[in-house]
């Protein structure tokens, strides 16, 4: 396994993030823009506000604040694992998607009020698996999904809901159906055990106690791509200083990235399947050749055995014939002994593989 060590120096990082957008700086460091923002926060490095680079392009750059005093660390060291396989370059459509979503004019805006939601959002709100939030968060969830659905329609990747609704909402990108889920975070609290339950635990060890945990909604939402194991990939979540509404463009990029990775994984599995199939074919061919060789060898052993039996029979018949003629001139072929000798020799010939059958 290979690890790459990266150093983040506070002064250098400050100059970099105010010279180029965070997305460009993060690529040089080999990390994500979200991770780089967290590092800047840990080092006390201020970041350009929203719309800063648009004003720079317009020739009206805002005033750049000075690097503030910071009592914490001035340097961070991070290690990241690099796989043995070389990283594949991003396809052109993914690069174009990042550039498109980074432009200020393409920012996805969630309305403060929603007068009429798209039909697909209405269907989701009626009970599909896409939305899992409390009633208090449902209006906000509908506004978020409505803004996302409208943005995806403009990007020629409409949000759909299966006929039964069991599949939930999904979007098809690069041939991949990506299920979307919007869930509300919960916190678990454990109640105190009763005296009886404490006694049972002490006596029997671990025991099941009903209603031991309660779950409370927090109002914090997470939007992501649902996986078969229940996890959410490419997720964006509410935080202390951010809300989902501010990062829908990044989520759209995440959808494209997820489709690319799933296609790569499908291709890798197909290549692996073909390799295994070829190995199985080679093993089968080797086993067939080995079986043929074994059958040929067994046939050879059988022919040698039959040849030896035939030679032994001939030798025995010759010995019988020699003993019979010691006191006589010849053996009459019509006699019993003559007929037996002819019969025995024909049997030897029938066993001998070197004698062709007439």
Image (tube, helix red, strand yellow):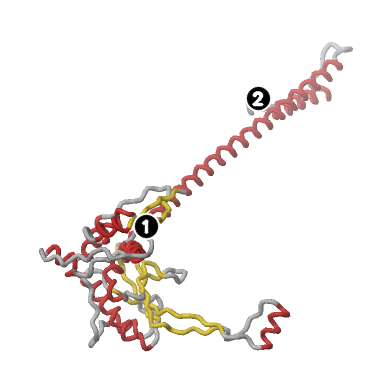
Q: Dividing the picture into quarters, in which one does residue 27 lie?
A: bottom left
Q: Position of residue 339 (x, y in %)?
A: 79, 25
Q: Residue 75 carries which label?
A: 1
Pointer 2 local density, CA inside 10 Å: few below 14, some 14–19, many at least 20: few
As drawn, 317 above or below 227: above
On screen, 14 above or below 169? above
In which quarter of the view is residue 239 placed? Answer: bottom left
Compared across the picture, whether 337 is left or right of 5 comes to right
If the image is split into quadrants, where does the C terminus sit? Answer: top right
Is residue 178 in sight in this rendering? yes
Q: Residue at x 41, y 78 (%)?
A: 166
Pinpoint residue 208: horizontal percent, then vertical percent: 63, 81
Residue 164 in sight here: no
- Residue name at image x 14 percent, y 65 percent: 61
Q: Which of 54 and 260 is in front in this view?
A: 54
Where is residue 289 shown, x and y percent of the image? 55, 37
Query: Toward the viewer: 95 or 267?
Result: 95
Q: For the residue labelled by badge 1, is the local secondary structure a helix, a strand or a loop? A: strand
The residue singled out by tag 2 in the image is 355
Task: Indicate the quadrant where residue 140 lies.
Answer: bottom left
Residue at point 33% right, 82% down? 141
Q: Tell me the CA gap for discs 2 and 1.
A: 94 Å
Residue in view at x 72 percent, y 78 percent: 204
Residue that sits furthest to the right in the current view:
327
Q: Which of marks 2 and 1 is in front?
A: 1
Q: Looking at the rendered structure, which numbered label has been put on residue 309?
A: none
Residues packed near mark 1 inside 10 Å, few (<14), some (14 to 19) or many (20 plus): some
């Amino acid at each position: 396994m290979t690890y790459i060590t990266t150093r983040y120096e506070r002064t250098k990082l400050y100059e970099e993030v105010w010279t180029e957008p965070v997305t460009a700086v993060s690529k040089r460091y080999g990390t994500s823009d979200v991770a780089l923002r967290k590092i800047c926060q840990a080092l006390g490095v201020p970041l350009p506000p929203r719309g800063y680079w648009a004003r720079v392009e317009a020739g009206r750059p805002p005033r750049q604040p000075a690097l503030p005093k910071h009592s914490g660390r001035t340097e961070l060291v991070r290690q990241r694992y690099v796989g043995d396989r070389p990283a594949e370059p991003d396809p052109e459509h993914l690069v174009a998607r990042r550039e498109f979503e980074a432009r200020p004019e393409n920012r996805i805006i969630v309305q403060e009020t929603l007068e009429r939601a798209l039909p697909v959002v209405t269907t989701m709100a009626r009970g599909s698996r896409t939305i899992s939030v409390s009633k208090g968060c449902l209006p906000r969830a509908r506004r978020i999904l409505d803004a996302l659905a409208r943005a995806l329609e403009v990007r020629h990747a409409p949000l759909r809901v299966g006929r039964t609704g069991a599949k939930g909402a999904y979007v098809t990108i690069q041939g991949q159906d990506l299920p979307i889920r919007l869930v509300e975070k919960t916190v678990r609290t454990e109640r105190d055990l009763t005296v009886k339950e404490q006694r049972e635990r002490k006596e029997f060890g671990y025991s099941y106690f009903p209603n031991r945990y309660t779950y409370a909604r927090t109002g914090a939402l997470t939007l992501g791509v649902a996986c078969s194991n229940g996890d959410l990939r490419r997720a964006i979540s509410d935080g202390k200083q951010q809300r989902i509404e501010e990062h829908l463009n990044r989520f759209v990029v995440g959808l494209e990235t997820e489709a690319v990775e799933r296609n790569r994984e499908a291709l890798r599995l197909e290549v692996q399947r073909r390799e295994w199939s070829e190995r199985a074919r080679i093993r089968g061919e080797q086993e067939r050749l080995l079986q043929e060789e074994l059958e040929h060898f067994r046939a050879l052993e059988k022919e040698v055995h039959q040849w030896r039996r035939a030679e032994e029979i001939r030798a025995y018949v010759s010995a019988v014939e020699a003993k019979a003629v010691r006191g006589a001139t010849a053996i009459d072929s019509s006699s019993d002994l003559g007929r037996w000798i002819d019969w025995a020799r024909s049997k030897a010939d029938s066993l001998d593989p070197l004698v062709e059958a007439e």
